[in-house]
Image (cartoon, rainbow, N blue to C red):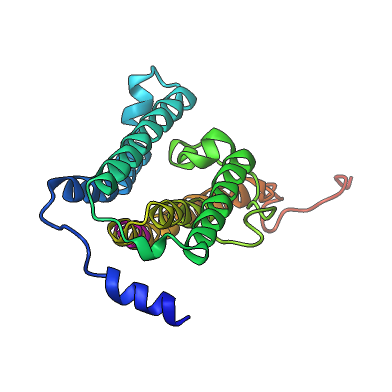
Amino acid sequence: MDNILQCYSDSRLKVDWNDHRMWIATASIIFNPTFWNIVARREYRSKFITRIFNGNSLNGCYALAATIFILGLIRDGLFKWALDAQPQVECMNSWPFQAVGYLLFGIGNIYVLSSMYVLGITGTYLGDYFGILMEDRVTSFPFNVNDNPMYNGTVMIFLGTALWSLSPAGIYLSLIVHFVYRIALKFEGPFTTMIYTKRDLARAAAQKPVPTKGNKKGGRAGTKRD
């Protein structure tokens, strides 16, 4: 434990904040969730992506999914690009740091990939903003052990990569990813809840029995008397 604390003390300031690559990577990390939240909300309100695809909301969702996926690859590349230019700390090249790094990377990938498998493309990539809603809340793995496995898994992958790269800068960038996702959830969670609440209210209203028109007040039932 003393060695780990000493390593932290020695390495926490070994970050070159003057390197432009560090700031480009940070900008990419912040941009991605900002972009998809703005675009998805505009799609929900105006259907501008759906209109581009001649009213086909599924194709619109696939197009946004491809865009988000590509932006994610660019972000990951910029993250690694930034780390390659940053100082490395040899005290992190020990089995506790490396074991934790590989463990985080492995668990993070399990969370992300299993989430995508359970949710599918439309469930993963904001299909609900296109009106493509899931019937029920997903409660199977990994959602039964983690409320936000996609976001938390991604943070774990970043942090694991930082540890095995011996990079204090990577740890700082991983923390930025974490805080950016926490902020994104403050916007996404309530908005998604609103979408499904509106769906449920509309269904409930549609299932209400329509009252039949009864006899007028004062009218007499039965056969006419002679």
36 vs 201, nearest the viewer: 36
- In this image, 29 relative to 131: left or right? left
Give the position of the C terminus as an image quadrant: top right
Q: Magenta region's main secondary structure?
A: helix
| Residue visible at 41% across and 58% down in the picture | 163
Q: Residue 67, percent across and down?
A: 36, 30
Q: In the image shown, does 208 or 95 lie closer to the viewer?
A: 95
The range drawn in magenta is 173-178
Q: Residue at x 10, y 55 (%)?
A: 18
Which of these two is toward me, 160 or 222?
160
x 42%, y 75%: residue: 4
In the rendered view, tell whether residue 127 sits above or below residue 96. above
Horizontal placement of 24 versus 220: left or right? Answer: left
The total of numbered circles placed on residues is 0
Does residue 134 show up?
no
Q: Quadrant of residue 167?
A: bottom left
User: Within the magenta stretch, is there residue 202?
Assistant: no
Q: x, y percentage for residue 65?
A: 43, 32
Residue 104 in view of the camera = yes
- Position of residue 9 measured from the top left corner of the image (x, y, whole percent): 30, 77
Q: Residue furthest bottom?
A: 2
Location of residue 176 in the rendering, given as x and y in whole percent from the top left corner: 30, 59
Q: Is residue 151 left or right of residue 147?
A: left
Q: Residue furthest top?
A: 54
